[in-house]
Image (cartoon, rainbow, N blue to C red):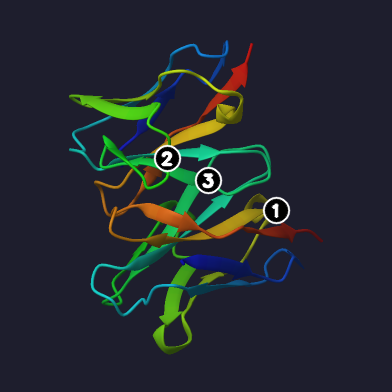
Amino acid sequence: QVTLKESGPGILQPSQTLSLTCTFSGFSLSTYGMGVGWIRQPSGKGLEWLANIWWDDDKYYNSSLKNRLTISKDTSNNQAFLKITNVDTADTATYYCARIGGAHCFDYWGQGVMVTVSS
Amino acid sequence: DIQMTQSPASLSASLEEIVTITCQASQDIGNWLAWYQQKPGKSPQLLIHSATNLADGIPSRFSGSRSGTQYSLKISRLQVEDTGIYYCLQRYSNPPWTFGGGTKVELK
């Protein structure tokens, strides 16, 4: 059974760094072809892809966030991480992590974690 | 970047009616397209992958098709539980992966 769960700070101030953790089970990020992605969704708006990390440590980012993103993984502890530097109120959203599996797209999603950026 | 233009933005249909949602890709993306359903307060659920393949556990009234760079999601007989917002996702370009803008499906 594949499960993912996001965790984060809840609220942070502008200019701070947002650190998110995705803890998963039911698959391994060391398995060929597996990946984990991060997606966010401001309240009442659509989905925005942020970054993917793959079993071989390949990483891909949404360039619209202008080098503010860093994705990483801890394979032995079944975790993936996302950092967003210099946050602004526009980064207020629900953040999801999702598995990239045999269907070559996001096939399992976490429940999401709400993040609010406010002074 | 590849743009995904999803239409309509919203629709209202009756029970058992046929519903079709489309995503137009700005360039060739092959079959690298997925469809998701999102209900209020929930995370998206995969419906269709590789443009036409039904995901595990998804009812057969959902189907996906492709004509060139236009992709369609069809619900053959709309049910109450099918209300929600539907999104397409292209993963041909790597990066970025791109979602469509979403289609809100309501019952008339």
Find disc 1 in the rendering and name its residue. A89
Identify the amino acid type marked 1: Thr
Q: CA distance from mark 3 to mark 1?
A: 24 Å
Identified at 42% across, 89% down, the residue is A76
Q: Which residue is mark 2?
A: B58
- Is B83 drawn above or below residue B87 in the view shown? above
Q: In the picture provided, is A6 more to the left or to the right than B17?
A: right
Q: Mark 1 falls on what kind of element? A: helix
For residue A64, above or below residue B40: below
Q: Secondary structure at mark 2?
A: loop
- SS assignment at label 3: loop
Tag 3 and tag 1 share a subunit: no
Foreground: disc 3 or disc 1: 3
The span from disc 2 to disc 3 (Cα, nearest Å) is: 13 Å
Query: Percent x, y for residue A22?
Result: 54, 71
Instruction: Give the residue at x 64% y 11%.
Output: B108
Discs 1 and 2 share one subunit = no
The residue at the point 53 percent across, 67 percent down is A4
Q: Earlier in the sequence, mark 2 or mark 3?
A: 3
